[in-house]
Image (spheres, helix red, strand yellow):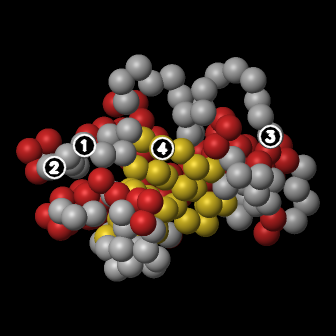
Amino acid sequence: MARLKEKYITLKPQIQESLGIKNVMQIPALEKVTISVGAGFAMKDNKLIQNIQETISTIAGQHATVVIAKKSVAGFKVREGMPVGVKVTLRGDKMYEFMDRLIAIALPRVKDFRGIPRNGFDGRGNYNFGLTEQLIFPEVSYDSIMQIHGMNITIVTTTNSDKEGLTLLEALGVPFTKGREDG
């Protein structure tokens, strides 16, 4: 069992008590984590798209898929069928292992890191934030990448309120910035 999942199981009673939840089934939990890269800069370079796909697959520990444009948009010089990004969705043990590596290893390696912003909640308890480079993950070799790119990480929870989502993520050890609390 993943280390973070064990931590969550032991913290469940405290989360329930702090939120004043009576039903055990209403305790917030992680549902899925999605990692995505918008690779519009690499639309015409197939090798670069494959390199991004391999990098995200290495980070996630699961095969990432290339996202194809569904419509042509002349303003962005995008044709239908062109690759425009890479994404992977993690659930279960792989999700907990990724979150553990993100919290314990990757985020502390960000230069001048003071925490991730609290304003990334969407109103339904889900959290979004972006990273500027993939090199903060130790499994990514500097020599194997063709271009430095960022990524968006979406953490989906089973709750419907930002307050409960924030409580869950703080209990799991997600390093938020200090200061005023939103939600």
> Residue 75 in the image: x percent, y percent?
44, 60
For the residues labelled 3 and 1, the Cα–Cα distance comes to 33 Å
**Counting residues from the N terminus, which is met first, the one under dot 3 or under dot 4?**
4
Residue type at the position of mark 4: Gly
In space, the residues marked 1 and 2 are separated at their CA atoms by 7 Å
Label 3 residue SS? loop
Q: Are marks 1 and 2 in contact (CB under 8 Å)?
A: yes
The residue under label 1 is which amino acid type?
Ile
Sequence-wise, which precedes: disc 4 or disc 2? Answer: 4
Residue designated by label 2: 145
Can residue 44 be seen by looking at this rendering? yes
- Is 162 positioned to the left or the right of 156 in the image? right
* Chain-order first, disc 3 or disc 1: 1
Query: Considering depth in this image, is 164 or 52 the residue closer to the camera?
Result: 52
Element type where label 2 sits in the image: loop
* Mark 3 and mark 4 residues within 8 Å of each other at the beta carbon: no
Q: Considering depth in this image, is 120 or 90 the residue closer to the camera?
A: 120
Residue 22 vertical position relative to residue 14 in the rendered view, above or below: below
Q: Position of residue 172 (x, y in %)?
A: 59, 45
- In this view, the residue farthest toward the front is 74
> Which residue lies under the disc numbered 3?
183
Label 1: state its secondary structure.
Answer: loop
Disc 2 versus disc 3: nearer the observer: 2
Give the residue at mark 4. 130
- 72 and 149: which is toward the camera: 72
Residue designated by label 1: 148
Where's residue 48, x and y in %? 18, 59
